[in-house]
Image: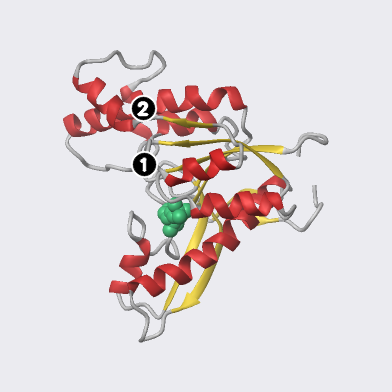
Amino acid sequence: MKGNSKMKIGVLVSGGGSNLQAIMDAVAVGALDVEIACVGSDNPDAKGLERAEKAGIPTFVTDYSAFFARWKEGAALPEDFSLETVASRQSLMKGSDPDILKAFLEKRALAEAALLAALAPYKIDLLVLAGFMRVLTPYFIDALNTDSNRPRIMNIHPALLPAFPGTDGYGDTFRYGCKVGGCTVHFVDYGEDSGPIIGQSCFPIESSDDLDAVKKKGLAEEWRLFPDCIGLYAEDRLNVVERQGTRVVEILPPAAR
Ligand code: GRF
């Protein structure tokens, strides 16, 4: 994308990191032409960190719990944080009590400032959320998304959005009795799992499937879909356009730009 240099991605994980592994494997076999510059986590014990270390990729931890504790002790907020601005942009906690919203955004601003500082040295083009179980507020998102036509944060979600946003996509799909499940890769915006959809993949749910079987089928789709979507971004083939009031992603043919 930038001359001959490879696109640099950062990956954030909170747990097992099987999606990270799929991305690393795609890079290793040459199916995905990007450099994984760093892997970070909010969880010091995330197995994903071990996977990265094993592959020689630099890692870091931004321990959210520690920042939340510092907020309770009255730690100074980041200088560039404006509660008014971030509160007016966010749509994660619409209509919530102002004091609860204030605490929610301030705590996260402390952690997100540290996350931004940890990422800064790697000068990444794209941040990939691969099972990162923290919502990101406009404070963080706006720091990365400096060009509205080129969002820079991509997430994978375990359901066919816009159905079943939230933390338990496969569980919600299964409990609802859906006959098809799926996963979605999307750009991150100010809402919960609400940003422009880049790619989706689905699988049948049979009567004999239990929740574990659904998760297994879903993860197998995720491992294929996520590297593909990152590849489209690296090839500069994702165009965000406004269609009837909604921001959507057009996928351009190869080498169209
Ligand atoms: C995946 O199901 C992903 O869709 C969701 O969290 C899970 C992460 O799995 N956001 P892993 O850590 O990549 O194995």
Q: Which mark is residue 111?
A: 2
- Element carrying mark 1: loop
Spot occupied by residue 77 in the image (x, y as percentages of width and height): 32, 16
Query: Do the residues under discs 2 and 1 have CB atoms within 8 angstroms?
Result: yes
Quarter of the image holding residue 109? top left
Q: Ligand 1: give its quadrant.
A: bottom left
Please name whichever residue, 236 or 31, is drawn nearer the observer in this view of the structure. Answer: 31
Q: Residue at x 23, y 25 (%)?
A: 69
Q: Residue at x 76, y 39 (%)?
A: 1
Spot occupied by residue 95 in the image (x, y as percentages of width and height): 22, 42
The Cα–Cα distance between marks 2 and 1, rounded to whole angstroms, is 10 Å
- Element carrying mark 2: helix
On the rendered structure, is 137 left or right of 126?
A: left
Mark 2 crowd level (few <14, some 14–19, many ≥20, 10 Å Cα): many
- Labels 2 and 1: the sequence-earlier one: 2
Q: From this view, report whether residue 62 is shown above or below residue 157.
A: above
- Mark 1 — residue? 134
Asked whether mark 2 lies closer than 8 Å to ligand 1, one says: no
On the rendered structure, is 233 left or right of 135?
A: right
Please name whichever residue, 164 or 18, is drawn nearer the observer in this view of the structure. Answer: 18
Q: Residue at x 40, y 74 (%)?
A: 213
Spot occupied by residue 73 in the image (x, y as percentages of width and height): 19, 17
Q: From this view, report whether residue 219 is shown above or below residue 99.
A: below
The residue furthest bottom is 207
